[in-house]
Amino acid sequence: MAKYLADIKQSIKDILLTPLGSRVMLPEYGSRLFELIDRRVDDEFRADLACYVIEAVEKWEKRVKIDEVRLISLENHALKFKIVFESGGSMEVAYA
């Protein structure tokens, strides 16, 4: 079971850390997180973060459902957030 969860978490990190449009043969693969770079952290930023994470994971990783996305920090252009799954598990992602 631990290996299964590790595979899912690795898959989610790959999806989220791949900029949308960067794969020639699969241009829809990835996320829009790169659009958050250099934006002011406010309610709109938090809403877009949750939206971009949920839309990418729902499209490419069918084994999980997201309950919540929480911003942890944004320091030195490094974004850190937590994904909480409906199943009760969670994971942290760092995006730099």
Image: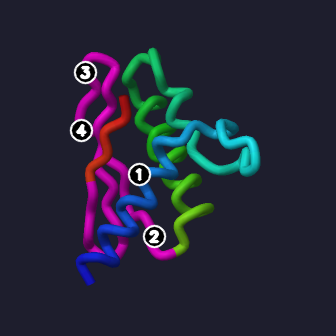
**Mark toward the viewer: 4 or 3:** 3
Q: Main secondary structure of the magenta part?
A: strand
Q: Say which label, 1 or 3, has the lower sequence index.
A: 1
The relative height of residue 31 versus residue 37 in the rendered view (above or below) is below
Dot 3 amino acid type: Glu
Q: Position of residue 67 (x, y in %)?
A: 39, 64
Instruction: Indicate whether residue 62 is drawn in magenta.
Output: no
Residue 13, numbered circle: 1
Residue labelled with disc 3: 75
Q: Position of residue 68 (x, y in %)?
A: 37, 57
Q: Position of residue 56 (x, y in %)?
A: 57, 53
Left-right relation of 35 to 85: right
Instruction: Indicate whether residue 75 is drawn in magenta.
Output: yes
Residue 52 location, quadrant: top right
Residue 72, numbered circle: 4
Residue 42, numbered circle: none
